[in-house]
Image (tube, rainbow, N blue to C red):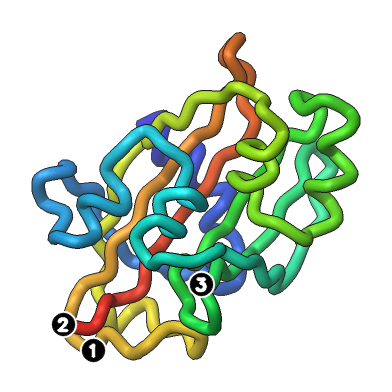
Amino acid sequence: MERTLEIQDLLACENLRDLQFNWVDPEEVEDPYRELLCHQRDMTSTLARFHGGKVSLKVFQEPSDRECYVREVLLKVDDKPVEYGLIRIFLENFPEELRTEIIGGGKPLGAILNDSGLRYLSEPGGFLKIPGETFDPDFFPAAGSKFLFGRYNSLLSEDRKVLARIIEILPREKS
């Protein structure tokens, strides 16, 4: 129940407003998506390793929120989309020197955290199975009748303050 309430704020974004999904156990996530989602690491370095390149960031929008910095993003390796994400970042829980870099939108949050040396925890709160025909953005290859997979994740400081809450959705990999 708690994760459903937490995720509802993120689902208010225009691209996710009507998102249909089921919560699934990690063993129900198909390969290679299980390898990419079912872990306690950041997605930026995981995607960079899997796709063999540096992950870049495209920010679609930054909806205003009094409590947090929120952004809708697409992560790419070269020109290939590798993740759609919606992230709520709790800036007050970051050191001052990282806040400007985060808001600058030049790098994915995972890259900023890893480059800074700030120690943090990644705690997936659940895994999503999404019918491809219900989530078909123009920045992903068409999934057709196949499923997309994603996760709801929290990044926490060592003292367990919430740094960010994220919905991460992966495009279908070509077979």
In the rendered image, which residue does mark 3 sit on? 77
Task: Look at label 3 and name its amino acid.
Answer: Val
Which residue lies most toward the left here?
A: 27
Q: Residue at x 78, y 59 (%)?
A: 105
Spatial CA distance of label 1 from label 3 is 23 Å
Residue 77 placement, left or right of 66: left
Residue 23 placement, left or right of 150: left
Q: Residue at x 24, y 59 (%)?
A: 33
Name the quadrant of the N terminus.
Answer: top left
In the rendered image, which residue does mark 2 sit on? 175
From the top left corner, tell me how far across and down residue 129 is, in percent: 24, 60
Residue 25 placement, left or right of 20: left
Residue 30 placement, left or right of 13: left
Dot 1, how many residues are within 10 Å of its Cα: few (below 14), some (14-19), or many (20+)? some
Q: Secondary structure at mark 2?
A: loop
Q: Earlier in the sequence, mark 2 or mark 1?
A: 1
Dot 2, how many residues are within 10 Å of its Cα: few (below 14), some (14-19), or many (20+)? few
Q: Which mark is residue 144?
A: 1
Q: Nearer the viewer, residue 137 or 82?
A: 82
Spatial CA distance of label 2 from label 1 is 14 Å
Q: Earlier in the sequence, mark 3 or mark 2?
A: 3
Quadrant position of residue 128: bottom left
Task: Look at label 2 and name its amino acid.
Answer: Ser
Q: Nearer the viewer, mark 3 or mark 2?
A: 3
From the top left corner, tell me how far across and down residue 108 is, in percent: 64, 54
Q: Residue at x 19, y 48 (%)?
A: 24
